[in-house]
Amino acid sequence: MAISLPPILEPERTEPEHAAARLSGNELRLRDGHGRALTDLRLSVTDRCNYRCVYCRTGNDGAQFTELPIEQYARMLRVFVALGIEKVRLTGGEPLLRHGLLDLIRETAKLRAAFSDAPLDIAITTNGHLLAPMAKELKAAGLARITISMDAVDTGTFTRITRVPGSFERVQEGIRAAQGAGLGPVKINCVLLRGFNDSQIEAFAEFSRREKVIVRFIECMPLEEDRTWSPETVVPMREIIARLNAVRPLVALPANHASETARRFTFDDGVGEIGIIAPVSEAFCGHCSRVRVTSDGKLRTCLFSQSDHDLIGLMLRGANDDEMSSWIRRIVQHKEARHHIGEPGFLKPSRSMVHIGG
């Protein structure tokens, strides 16, 4: 029997036992003004991308192509890990385009031992186009997990979205290479846009079951470069669940942790896993654990912030690690309680997604 969508409960906030075990100066972990522990850093290492996805980039006219030296990202990471960051996701643009990425992963993998007994969880989000020849090197450098952005499971639809011919086959190779390198279970992120790829929901369910990957559907957010988003583009969670139930009955899975953004499901036979990330129709801001650093070194406290904060400027003016830590603590005290998508007066963020970091 098909399940109905379970009520959205506020899970009890829990903290890993190793939290703040050996944080610098025995300070408490990084928290915002709402009491949320901030343990997850999204660091963009480039805003360059070799795709031009229709929901993200309209062309190269708005591209900034701003990058910092790898050594500067490494220093920022050291400061954040000292503040209790446990998960680092390297993003872009397309991070696999970035020269020095493997060196950054190696240096990042060494950091956690200086501050805690637990390993640092290092992940990457990539479009997968360049992944196949790099997968083993990424694993050897210290990468733990990988997420691949893939918005269709057929060549025609995929090419129409990415606007790069021949890309679908390259991504398939990348998925297989990541699994072979031990970076599984691979997560596949699919941004759903009505009229573009909403026909792919059922096919993605079969893809998850067949290829042993975790598929996560993401509601389209107002983060595109040309500012054309409208509520009509969103395929909401309840519709996704209804259509997946028509494939096979869904069974809800528990969250891996309180701040997890995806609602998790499997099918009644236990084969396949589907996640649904619904920031538009079912906002999950209450337990947000994230902060972001853009490729040009700006700290953002929310994906939908109207401003960002000049971390690289502070660093280049000679701030030491303790001064940077104190500055970060002051900034995150003003982290937004939630976004306001769909509410009267909502303002889109000051940057598009490719310039913020996925």
Image (spheres, rainbow, N blue to C red):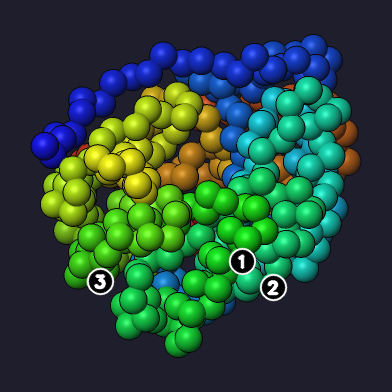
Pick the front one: 343 or 147: 147
Are circles 2 and 1 on residues that touch, CB within 8 Å? yes
The disc placed on residue 11 is: none
Query: Looking at numbered disc 1 in the image, what kind of residue is underneath it?
Result: Ala
User: How far apart are labels 2 and 1 at the CA level?
Assistant: 8 Å
The amino acid at mark 2 is Pro
* Mark 3–mark 1 distance (CA, rounded to whole Å): 28 Å
Verify CB contact (< 8 Å) between mark 3 and mark 1. no
Q: Quadrant of residue 265?
A: top left
Q: Which residue occupies the foreground of this view, 278 or 62?
A: 278
For label 3, the crowd category at 10 Å Cα-Cα, with few meaning under 14, some 14 to 19 and many 20 or more, is some
User: Depth-wise, is mark 3 or mark 2 nearer the camera?
Assistant: 2
192 shown above or below 111: below
Q: Earlier in the sequence, mark 2 or mark 1?
A: 2
Which element carries disc 3, helix, strand or loop? loop
Crowding at label 2, few (<14), some or many (≥20) Cα neighbours within 10 Å? few
Which dot, 3 or 1, sits closer to the camera? 1
Residue 133: which disc?
2
From the viewer's perspective, tell me whether residue 88 is left or right of residue 246. Answer: right
SS at circle 2: helix
Closer to the chain start, of discs 3 and 1, is 1
Question: Residue at 13% of width from left, 52% of height from top?
Answer: 246
Residue at 51% in and 72% down:
171
Q: Is residue 63 above or below residue 240?
A: below
Determine whether, in the image, residue 55 is placed left or right of residue 311.
left
Percent of width and height locating residue 8: 25, 26
For label 1, the residue is 177
